[in-house]
Image (spheres, rainbow, N blue to C red):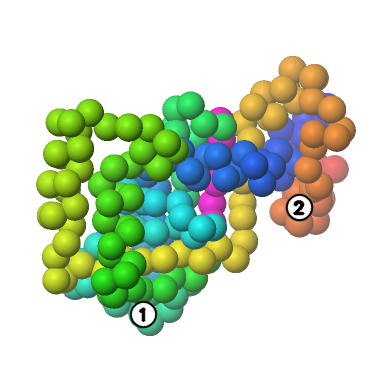
Amino acid sequence: MSSQDHEQVSIYPFSEAQREELLSKAGECVFNWTTKDGWAVGVVHAFVWHEGRAWITCGVHRHRVSAIRRDPRCSVVVSGIAAPDGPNGAITIKGRAIIHDDEETKQWFYPALARGPYVRQGGTLSAEEEDQAKDFERRLDSPLRVIIEIVPEKWITLDSDKMAKDTAGLLTDEERGPLLEADSVRMPAELKRRGLE
């Protein structure tokens, strides 16, 4: 392993199954958008991973709603810390947002969000927890609330366990992903520019 190998993180991707597991088990993400004056902004959101899409909610008067109406390009970042029994690492989704304000979407989304990933994974709530979830549903059901669907277009993933395994000299070639452009083209060019070839 060369002195620069620790910089080549694109070779540690999640498998599709790991990606699905992390997104299904995590209940929290960071949703990012761009303001009209070009600033990147992000907020922490509870979210639901459903049918290959990330779903969040907020009041229609929030700046993020007008921002994604202007430009639907956005991103969602999910850390493995948000899913303690899930894969260790992180996922960034680059995608486009769609705003929903219809009853059909609210009918499935509010109960799913209120009950969290544990229930979506097949777990059950106690009677007291179920009462709390129903109360949360009632509070969510506001006339000002919209639901935002994020449709993935590109994935950036990091399997931290693969990285640790490689550091220990135990990762096989079959477990490595391909070097992506940042590592295969841009990093060598930057090393050359700095005289570090």
Looking at the image, residue 41 lies above or below residue 173 = below
Q: Which residue is drawn at 54% across and 57% down?
A: 52
Give the residue pinned by disc 2: 180
Q: Quadrant of residue 20?
A: top right
Q: Residue at x 76, y 56 (%)?
A: 181
Identity, as a three-letter code, of the amino acid under mark 1 = Arg
- Secondary structure, magenta segment, majority class: strand
Q: Where is residue 21 in the image (x, y as percent from the top left)?
A: 55, 39
Looking at the image, residue 59 lies above or below residue 192 = below
Q: Distance between the residues labelled 1 and 2?
A: 31 Å
Q: Mark 1 or mark 2, which has the lower sequence index?
A: 1
Look at the image and tell me whether residue 63 can be seen.
no
Of the 4 image quadrants, the one containing the N terminus is top right
Residue 69: image tag? 1
Secondary structure at badge 2 equals loop
Q: Which residue is drawn at 33% across and 42% down?
A: 116
Magenta extent? 88-94
Give the camera-side residue of 191 and 74.
Answer: 74
